[in-house]
Image (tube, rainbow, N blue to C red):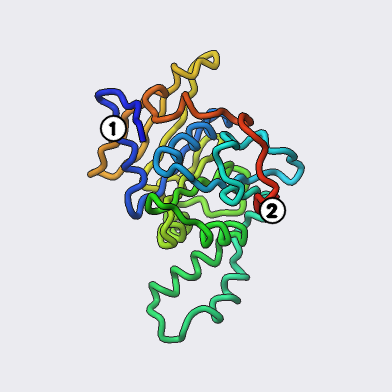
């Protein structure tokens, strides 16, 4: 894939390394989703997209680049259906593990089974010829009240995706909480003034010490691969009728 990185721009492919999870946030939802889509496409030409909606939401206008997300890669989930499944996980656990399983294996099963059913289905179904499939969970701010707020409690959720063999990217509107430190990479999306996309930056708040992406670096939008050339929110064709959870 052709990159438009500047000479001093870190290689964002590092976000797709094994075991990594990414959290991005910002004050402008269209810009946030557009950045999430560009990062996902940079890592995987055919990413998966879970779009969390309010129950009253209609249409598909919020999903960026619909024409480039396959119908079976797009999952539209109502916020009440995106709550963690604690009781269901505890009940289902006894049907999928043996009594002699190591504690670490049991913990991994429980973490996965606590994910909302639509997300479990999407993760289980995901495949990519490029390696680990990339999975964007968009608009997680809409389910924030249902989930833990501390990093130690959020990390098992990230691990559920990582152990399933996918690269998770969570996108959340508004000021972030302490839970963001559960992720390996944390970025703030700062759109340009007066809607000028070329003036925006992607600011890194956290990155692994050995990563080519360093904490504190600010990557101009024109240097984020595909960001200014991908379709914006609502552009492209309509979502396939086969999209799950619609």
Residue 1 vs 85, above or below: the answer is above
Q: Residues within 10 Å of mark 2 (few under 14, many from 20)?
A: some
Query: In the image, what residue occupies the spot 42% across and 44% down?
Result: 44
From the image, tell me which residue sits under label 2: 80
Front: mark 1 or 2: 1
| Res 185 label | none
Q: Which mark is residue 10?
A: 1
Mark positioned earlier in the residue sequence (1 or 2):
1
On the picture, is 79 further left or further right than 213? right
Q: Quadrant of the N terminus?
A: top left
Q: Using residue 142 as the reference point, say whether residue 218 is left or right of it.
A: left
Which is more toward the observer, 119 or 70?
Answer: 70
Relative horizontal placement of residue 9, taking residue 52 as reference (left or right): left
Q: Secondary structure at mark 1?
A: loop
| Residue 12 to residue 122: above or below | above
Coordinates of residue 145 in the picture (x, y in percent):
61, 49
Question: In the picture, residue 82 is in which quadrant?
Answer: bottom right
Q: Which residue is painted at 65% across and 53% down in the image? A: 244
Label 2: element kind:
helix
Structural crowding at the residue carrying mark 1, measured as other residues with C-alpha within 10 Å and reported as few (<14), some (14–19) or many (≥20): some
Mark 1 vs mark 2, CA separation in Å = 38 Å
Residue 68 percent coordinates (x, y): 55, 38
């Amino acid at each position: 894939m052709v990159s438009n990185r500047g000479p001093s721009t870190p290689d964002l492919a590092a976000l797709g390394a094994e075991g990594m999870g990414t959290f991005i946030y910002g004050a402008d939802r269209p810009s946030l989703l557009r950045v999430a889509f560009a990062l996902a496409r940079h890592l995987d030409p055919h990413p998966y997209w879970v779009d969390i909606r309010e129950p009253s939401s209609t249409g598909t206008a919020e999903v960026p680049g619909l024409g480039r997300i396959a119908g079976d890669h797009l999952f539209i989930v109502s916020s009440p259906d995106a709550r963690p499944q604690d009781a269901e996980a505890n009940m289902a656990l006894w049907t999928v593990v043996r009594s002699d399983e190591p504690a670490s294996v049991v913990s991994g099963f429980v973490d996965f089974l606590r994910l909302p059913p639509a997300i479990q289905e999407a993760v289980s179904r995901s495949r990519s010829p490029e390696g680990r499939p990339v999975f964007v969970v968009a608009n997680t701010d809409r389910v924030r009240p249902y989930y833990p707020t501390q990093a130690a409690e959020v990390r098992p959720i990230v691990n559920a995706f990582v152990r399933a063999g996918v690269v998770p990217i969570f996108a959340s509107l508004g000021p972030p909480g302490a839970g963001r430190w559960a992720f390996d990479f944390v970025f703030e999306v700062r759109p340009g003034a007066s809607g000028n996309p070329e003036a925006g930056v992607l600011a890194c708040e956290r990155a692994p010490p050995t990563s080519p992406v360093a904490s504190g670096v600010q990557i101009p939008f024109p240097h984020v691969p595909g960001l200014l050339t991908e379709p914006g929110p609502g552009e492209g064709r309509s979502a396939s009728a086969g999209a799950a959870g619609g």
